[in-house]
Amino acid sequence: MSNKNLLERSLNSVWHPCTQMKQHETLPLVPISRGEGVWLHDFDGSRYLDAISSWWVNLFGHSNPRINAAIRDQLDRLEHVMLAGFTHEPVVQLSERLIQIVPGRLGHCFYGSDGASATEVALKMSFHYWHNMGHPGKNNFISLQNGYHGETLGALSVTDVALFRETYSPLLRHSNHVRTPDWRYADQGESPRVYALRAAAQLEDFLVRHHTKTAALILEPLIQGAAGMGMYHSDYLKHAREICDRYQVHLIADEIAVGFGRTGTLFACEQADIAPDFLCLAKGLSGGYLPLSVVMTTDSVYQAFYHDETARAFLHSHTHSGNALACRAALATLDIFEQDGVIAANLIKAQYLNRVSEPITSHPKVKNFRNCGMVWAFEVETSDPAFSGKFFQAALKQGLLLRPLENTVYFMPPYVINEQEMDMLVTGTLRALDSC
Ligand SMILES: *Cc1c(COP(=O)(O)O)cnc(C)c1O
């Protein structure tokens, strides 16, 4: 196999995601033959530092020896068994361990295959809970302006990214978007915290009027990823939790992107010292290896479905729910967090990257340089609507995989990145900035 051969065959047979395929007349696909640590290799000896963890999933590098070994071991025992009526060791162990480490008391795990399906599950469960409790009128959802929760029709209904949403709007259920706490929207001189409180006040205004019809608020804690890594003050979460409790509205924390250490704590909700009613996890859950998602919820939600009547049960099925290989990859991922003291080690890595990023921070084209845990982002002042694609190409020439969201460049590297690789990331980013 060669680069050229693979590219041609891919364009003839694969419909690539999130892509205007015609662009590939001029923008070549990037063929990958293998991965190792933070590096992706092609067939001709070039390599790229995966600075966005392959769409935010890869926590401990490509081809991680420990995760590989766990999957190999599992493969020889049990690859998969249906989870309705059956159970197996990896899914039980994973559920028990997740229950131990997540914030609050979320004692029940429901498995899906990807992030969007976790969103669907959480929305349906919330509505069905209120239905079972005698409040069927609570059938609306609210979400944050610029929020992103996946692209199936239900998830898209609570997503507020125009590019993904507009075409399909006739298919979507109405839902309300409340003010984002993202501090880039603060007034001049207004601190991130004061702005977050202003956004929380608007949430309360909304719920005062609409709580009897509202089942849940869904949000991405601390960082709105697809919005362009919009970061916000943790006090928003504290207030949102209190407000949801006051008006009997569920809080769904979508930690699909921010869970598993991205924000500097194992889960973002920890930084506000809150627990959601539903916690959605995916992406890094399996170390990015295999499609796996989970929705975790409280005993009281679980109990509302526990009944002699079948229709009161949560009759939602995913064929690959709780897949054994994926659960085993997740267990190996949790082992690495425990054995390597990853959260503490990341803090030191983040300090290093912040230090060496000074030339980016002070670059004349760079605005809003920001960091939260293992996520960095900044806006580039440009009037070029094609900036994102051009920067992507320029970064590839520097051996970096960076994929800006419009004019927001961000780093979300695998946690195995070392100091030398962080130096390469900064140097390459500066060269890419200067060339476009
Ligand atoms: C990626 C993402 C999703 C959707 O996950 P998929 O696996 O792509 O369906 C949902 N919510 C957030 C916050 C995400 O970042």
Image (cartoon, helix red, strand yellow):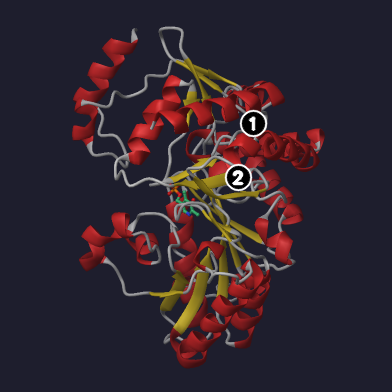
Image coordinates for residue 392, horizontal then vertical, percent: 40, 32
Q: Nearer the viewer, residue 18 or 119?
A: 18
Kind of residue indicated by mark 1? Phe
Q: Secondary structure at mark 1?
A: loop
Circle on res. 68: none
Q: Earlier in the sequence, mark 1 or mark 2?
A: 1
Kind of residue indicated by mark 2? Val
Q: Residue at x 68, y 33 (%)?
A: 356
Circle on res. 60: 1
Image coordinates for residue 225, horizontal then vertical, percent: 50, 52
Q: Nearer the viewer, residue 120 or 78?
A: 120
Quadrant of res 272: bottom right
Can you name the residue that lies furthest to the front here? 364
Quarter holding the N terminus is top left
- Alpha carbon distance from label 1 to label 2: 15 Å
Circle on res. 375: 2
Q: Secondary structure at mark 2?
A: strand
Front of the two marks 1 and 2? 2
Q: Residue at x 46, y 60 (%)?
A: 119
Packing grade of label 1 (10 A; few <14, some 14-19, many >=20) is many
Mark 2 sits near ligand 1, with its Cβ under 8 Å away: no
Residue 134 visible? no
Q: Residue at x 30, y 60 (%)?
A: 165
Left or right of residue 158: residue 218 = right
Q: Residue at x 38, y 32 (%)?
A: 436
Q: Nearer the viewer, residue 306 or 121?
A: 121
Q: How many marks?
A: 2
